[in-house]
Image: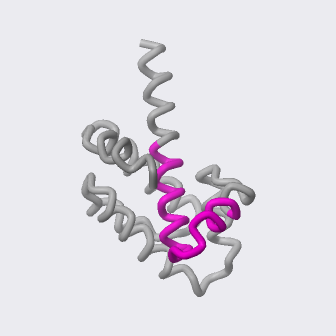
């Protein structure tokens, strides 16, 4: 979690946070995960992280392929996932996955906004 201060600062931007929530909802819904929790998210890393962990745990009993489909959609590769799980082997694996999800979706949103502003 070495980038946590940067994540907290980025989530304080209303425009960026709204784009983050829209992308999170889209990715979860495209993979048949419930995205009802997204509307209630607040720009607080710990709170968001916890809600994503809970949502992932709810789907634990379903086929593992659903989670892999979600991670592929978000663009988290299998090698990246394995490496990150190994580096954080003392943490709950859903907590590690939730962190990766937040970081990657935020990264996608920032990149999209950067290129959108370049076009203007």
The C terminus lies in quadrant: top left
Front position in the image: 53 or 33: 53
In the rendered view of the protein, which quadrant contains the N terminus? bottom left
Q: What kind of colouring is applied to the model shown?
A: one colour
Q: Total number of numbered labels?
A: 0
Res. 44 visible in picture:
yes
Percent position (x, y) of residue 22?
Answer: 40, 48
Question: Residue 87: x, y in percent?
Answer: 62, 63
Q: Nearer the viewer, residue 33 or 56?
A: 56
Is residue 18 visible from the viewing direction of this image? no
Residue 83 occupies quadrant = bottom right
Give the side of residue 92 with respect to residue 63, left or right. Answer: left
Residue 66 placement: quadrant = bottom right
Q: Residue at x 30, y 41 (%)?
A: 9
Q: Position of residue 29 (x, y in %)?
A: 51, 61
Residue drawn at point x = 48 percent, y = 81 percent = 58
Residue at 51 percent across and 57 percent down: it is 101
User: Please, what is the dominant secondary structure of the magenta stretch?
Assistant: helix
Is residue 28 rendered magenta in the image? Answer: no
First to last magenta residue range: 82-106
Q: Position of residue 108 (x, y in %)?
A: 52, 40
- Foreground pick, 3 / 81: 3
Relative to 39, say whether 95 is above or below.
below
């Amino acid at each position: 979690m070495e980038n946590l201060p940067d994540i907290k600062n980025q989530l304080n931007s209303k425009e960026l946070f709204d784009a983050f929530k829209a992308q999170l909802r889209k990715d979860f819904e495209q993979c048949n995960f419930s995205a009802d929790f997204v509307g209630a998210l607040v720009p607080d890393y710990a709170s968001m992280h916890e809600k994503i962990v809970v949502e992932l745990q709810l789907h634990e009993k379903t086929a593992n392929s659903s989670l892999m489909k979600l991670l592929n959609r978000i663009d988290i590769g299998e090698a990246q996932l394995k490496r990150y799980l190994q580096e954080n082997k003392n943490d709950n694996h859903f907590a590690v996955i939730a962190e990766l999800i937040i970081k990657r979706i935020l990264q996608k949103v920032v990149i999209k906004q950067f290129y959108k502003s370049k076009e203007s």
